[in-house]
Each structure stands twice: as C-alpha cells, then as structure tokens.
Amino acid sequence: MAARAIWKGNLKLGTTKVPVKLYSAVEDRTVRFHVLDDRAKKRVKQHMIDPDSGEEVPKEEIQKGYEIEPGKYVILTQEDLEKVQPPPSRDIEIVEFVPQAKISQQWYERPYYAGPDGDEKEYFALVEALQNKESEGIAHWVMRNKYYAGALRAVDDYLYLFTLRDAKEVILSDDLTKPSGAAPTQKELAMATQLVSMLEGEFDPKEYKDEYRERVTEFIEKKAKGRAPKLRAVKAKRQTAALDNVLAKSIEALRKKEKRAA
C-alpha cells in the first residue's frame, strides 16, 4: 500500500520556497482493547459523573479547567482556546543550520518523511547540500492548529523532518546526580573493552521487535480459533554484583558461542 501524505507545506529558506508533502515515518502498533459488558459482550460507553451525587453531568455543562493550586481552577472556554491557537500557515521556516552532532538524540520526538511536491530540482539540491555540509536545519511551523519546532535532515537521499521536544521536557545530563562510586580498575576497563569488541556487529532493525505485542497478538489469534494457548513465563535474568565477574562470565559465554559456530 502506497504511503499517503498527511500534510502539505513549503520549506521556506529566506525568499526560497520548496514545496513538500509530509508522510508519517513511524506507525503506532500498540495493542488496544475495547471495554465490553460482561454479559452482552457489547462495548460500553463512558460518562462524566458527579463524584458527590453520582449523577451523570450533561455534555453542555462540562468545562475545561487548569488547576493552578489544589481545588482552584482557571476555566477555559472553547472560544478562549481558539484565541490562543497559532495563526494557520503552510510554511516550514528554516531559521538556521547547525552541525548534526550538535543536537542530542533526546531532543528528537517524531519523524516525518518530507517528500517533494512538484518541481524536484530545488528539493534534491537541498538534500545534496545538507549531506555535503553534514548539517540540519532548525525549523518552525504550524500544523493542525499546533506550533512545532523541528530539525530537517537529509537521510538516504531524502529529507526527514523531526519534531523536537520542548526545552522544559528534556532532562539534561547536567541535572543528574554524578556517580559517587569508585572508578573502574584497569582490569575492569580492559575486560569491558574486550566485551565491546566481541559484540561488534551491524545493526539489523528486523531483529528488534515488540515481544509483548507479538505474544499478545499470537495469544488472541489462537484463542479466536477456539484454542486455549499456553504461554511460557518470561524469566528475569539474574546478575552477580561484582562488575569483573559479570564481564568475565559474558566474555566466556561469547567465546563458547564462537567455538560452537566454528
């Protein structure tokens, strides 16, 4: 099935505009369940209930409030919310270019493909320029009544647009408590280096799956066919406390695995 564009806009670099289409680069595959009545096996509806009287609150009497202190709220109407929405725009404005290494991975939130929409010459010229400079553009845009900041990067000869997290959402390493334990010994460093070397390989995304989702969907499929599937329990792995013992056992296990493979 061909990918479908979810939004159209223009990459704006000064006075130059490059038309693009945005496509989702990820797909949510979370297992979701419906809430059913135990007897009729029909979906039940949720209602807003007054906690004191237990009676249902009519939809027209429901308001949105932001709690500023316990029990005290600022009420916002639909008109209030519409007033604070950013003005609509189709421009993805690139405000500056920075080296790719300057943006830590924790800032990236959701990826989109930014594909060409119409004339492709300027599009692929921008792709090549970003690849040659190893830079990415910091972008601002409005999409579906929401303001976004993002990073534009060239990957595999196409443009990717990543939404960036708000600065208040990112916890920097400077805010973390520094390790207070003893520094690793030379022996532990050498063993850790050896272990890393023995585990070197190529990244294959097909090897990394949501095992929980696969177990749940497999269970559902078998139960739907009238079978009573049994799943083995997932056992937690135990590790020894001493770092050098952990490394030594890991290295020994890898050596045995290499010998069996040979």
Image (cartoon, helix red, strand yellow):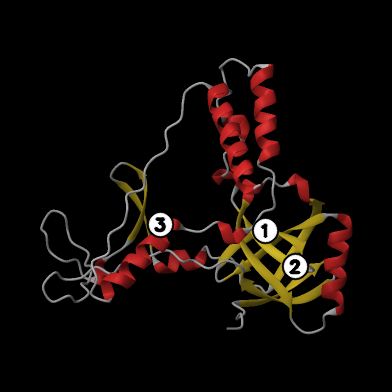
Q: In the image, which is nearer the foreground, mark 1 or mark 2?
A: 2
Q: Which residue is mark 2?
A: 159
Q: Are marks 3 and 2 in contact (CB under 8 Å)?
A: no
Residue 71 drawn at (x, y percent): 28, 45
Find numbered disc 3 in the image and state the secondary structure of the residue it sits on: helix
Residue at left offset 27%, top offset 59%: 230
Residue 88 drawn at (x, y percent): 61, 72
Mark 1: few, some, or many residues within 10 Å (few <14, many ≥20)? many
Residue 238 higher or lower than 65, as above or below? above
> Label 3 to label 2, Cα distance in Å?
32 Å
> Label 1 to label 3, Cα distance in Å?
31 Å
Q: In the image, which is nearer the foreground, mark 1 or mark 3?
A: 3
Badge 3 or badge 2: first in the primary sequence: 2
Q: Say whether residue 41 is visible.
A: yes
Q: Nearer the viewer, residue 124 or 45?
A: 124
Q: Which residue is mark 3?
A: 212
Badge 1 or badge 3: first in the primary sequence: 1
Badge 1 or badge 2: first in the primary sequence: 1
Mark 2: few, some, or many residues within 10 Å (few <14, many ≥20)? many
Q: Which residue is mark 1?
A: 150
Residue 253 drawn at (x, y percent): 56, 36
**With 161 as the anchor, is 229 left or right in this view?**
left
Q: Nearer the viewer, residue 244 or 64?
A: 244
Q: Amino acid at mark 2?
A: Leu
> Label 1 to label 2, Cα distance in Å?
12 Å
